[in-house]
Amino acid sequence: VSVKLVATAGIGTVAAGVTKANADVIQVSGSDGGTGASPLSSIMHAGGPWELGLAEVQQTLVTNNLRDRVVIRVDGGLRTGWDIVVGAMMGADEFGFGTIVMIAEGCIMARVCHVNRCPVGVATQKAELRKKFPGTPEHIENFFLFVAEEVRVILAALGYKSLEEVCGRSDLLSRRRMDIARKSVPAPPAARPRASSDVKIQEVTKTSGVVLDSMLEGASVTPEQRAWVGVALKAPAHSNGTVFDDLVVNDPEFRTFVQKNNGVFEQEHTITNTDRA
């Protein structure tokens, strides 16, 4: 069972609820991304940044000892290996790609998927338009190979061997200094200039009042804190035990009736509000 939750205030409470209800995967969806079939209002105004939603879900589940029961998947405008590493540090186990994969195989985001007139033949049944489709499986394969390579290089520069080692390590993140341009691949620790404690971080007025400390709380550093890492990924799907449907389907009289497929079958059962389909 996969439950998709939009990244917004209060997502942590909902995530805790669906985890207790035996969800196998919680998908945190950010406001960015969106396929060409999405309305412009949905692309521009649905939810908030995936980082905010992911941080709240991760902290809520860890605080309530629920993190080992569910896999957290994040999506919404993921583009690069840098996004993958940051998402893992904030607690994500899996990552969803949509828009960027469509673009990799030739989509130009014309937003006409629903009218059967895709100009590059991605979302259309018209033979003359499908001939224009430029994509091949190798395009997507190459894209993911480059993403994986960037992840590998970033982890190596930080001194780690796998994403599992940095999963939940929000203590490795810090607010970006405005006087240092972002680089997709960080310099190795030995070559990285040491920041002086008396150097003031340059800020722009628009973001000077933004407090990001709450996003980086609850880092899983010690072995005890990291006991949840990888547990949900390796565990089988949740089972609700024997449910009402099982009792009906396994009834010998009912199975005989289904096999004959003739006549009318009636039974009486006592049901309660916990008997779900």
Image (spheres, rainbow, N blue to C red):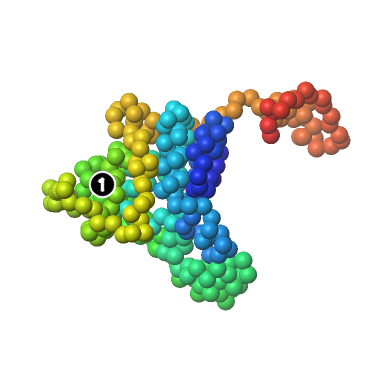
Where, by quadrant of the figure, is residue 105 drawn? bottom left
Q: Is residue 101 left or right of residue 191?
A: right
State which quarter of the image contains the C terminus: top right
Residue at image mark 1: 155
> Does 246 sit above or below residue 95?
above
Q: Amino acid at mark 1?
A: Leu
Q: Residue furthest bottom?
A: 128
Q: Is residue 36 visible?
A: yes
Q: Residue at x 25, y 50 (%)?
A: 154
Where, by quadrant of the figure, is residue 143 drawn? bottom left
Q: Is residue 130 visible?
A: no
> Does 85 sit above or below residue 113?
above
> Does 62 sit above or below residue 26?
above
Q: Nearer the viewer, residue 152 or 21?
A: 21
Residue 267 position within the rendered picture, expressed as x and y whole percent measured from the top left: 82, 26
Q: Residue at x 38, y 57 (%)?
A: 79
Q: Is residue 97 left or right of residue 42?
A: left
Residue 273 position within the rendered picture, expressed as x and y whole percent measured from the top left: 71, 28
Q: Residue at x 49, y 55 (%)?
A: 31
Residue 224 position within the rendered picture, expressed as x and y whole percent measured from the top left: 32, 25
State which quarter of the image contains the N terminus: top right
Where, by quadrant of the figure, is residue 17 drawn? top right
Q: Nearer the viewer, residue 253 or 29?
A: 29
Q: Nearer the viewer, residue 43 or 249?
A: 43
